[in-house]
Image (cartoon, rainbow, N blue to C red):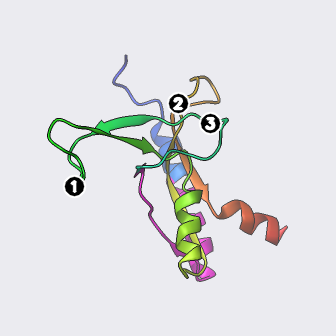
């Protein structure tokens, strides 16, 4: 495994500018950026997506030498919907998502997802 980055400095700069423009777009429209948990006690509801999990034994409910399965989010939608249901206004999130699927040119187990953008782009088009 190579320790060298796969993202060039030029592409990192482009990515940073894109993220800056996305944040500016939402800020201009009073849409609040939120951050939801990456780990959850519950797995996902989509039966066609496999979640990555880890064992954690420091929860308040854990007994000595007993670990709990925690799942890495495959998408922030569930937690964001909970925020909306609790009374939050317009929100968006740029975060990492994780999926236990094949790795290839178009697939990676860890990737950045922008939740909330698709809806806005559909409304504007």
Which badge, 2 or 1, comes first in the chain's sequence?
1
The part of the chain drawn in magenta is 16-39
- The residue to which callout 3 is attached is 49
- Of the 4 image quadrants, the one containing the C terminus is bottom right
Q: Return the residue nearer the eye: 84 or 27.
A: 84
Q: Which mark is residue 26?
A: none
Q: Residues within 10 Å of mark 2 (few under 14, many from 20)?
A: some
* Residue with the most extreme left position: 64
Q: Residues within 10 Å of mark 3 (few under 14, many from 20)?
A: few
Provide the secondary structure element on which disc 2 rests: loop
Provide the secondary structure element on which disc 3 rests: loop
Q: Is residue 18 left or right of residue 56?
A: right
Percent position of residue 28, x then y: 61, 81
Q: Is residue 24 above or below residue 2?
A: below
Residues under numbered marks 3 and 1 in contact, where contact means CB atoms less than 8 Å apart: no
Corner quadrant of residue 18 = bottom right
Which badge, 2 or 3, comes first in the chain's sequence?
3
Q: Residue at x 41, y 31 (%)?
A: 5
Q: Is residue 22 magenta?
A: yes
Q: CA distance from mark 2 to mark 3?
A: 8 Å
- The total number of labels drawn is 3
Q: Is residue 52 magenta?
A: no
Q: Is residue 85 above or below residue 71?
A: below
Residues under numbered marks 2 and 3 in contact, where contact means CB atoms less than 8 Å apart: no
Provide the secondary structure element on which disc 1 rests: loop
Which badge, 3 or 1, comes first in the chain's sequence?
3
Percent position of residue 117, x then y: 67, 62
Mark whose residue sits in front, 3 or 1: 1
Q: Residues within 10 Å of mark 1 (few under 14, many from 20)?
A: few
- The residue to which callout 2 is attached is 100
- The residue to which callout 1 is attached is 60
């Amino acid at each position: 495994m190579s320790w060298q980055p796969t993202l060039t400095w030029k592409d990192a700069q482009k990515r940073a500018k894109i993220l800056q423009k996305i944040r500016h777009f939402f800020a201009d429209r009073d849409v609040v950026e939120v951050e939801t948990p990456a780990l959850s006690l519950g797995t996902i509801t989509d039966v066609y997506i496999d979640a990555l999990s880890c064992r954690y034994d420091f929860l308040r409910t854990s007994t000595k030498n007993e670990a709990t399965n925690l799942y890495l989010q495959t998408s922030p939608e569930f937690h964001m919907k909970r925020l909306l249901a609790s009374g939050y206004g317009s929100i968006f999130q740029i975060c990492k998502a994780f999926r236990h699927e094949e790795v290839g040119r178009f697939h990676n187990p860890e990737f950045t997802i922008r939740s909330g953008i698709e809806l806005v782009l559909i409304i504007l088009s």
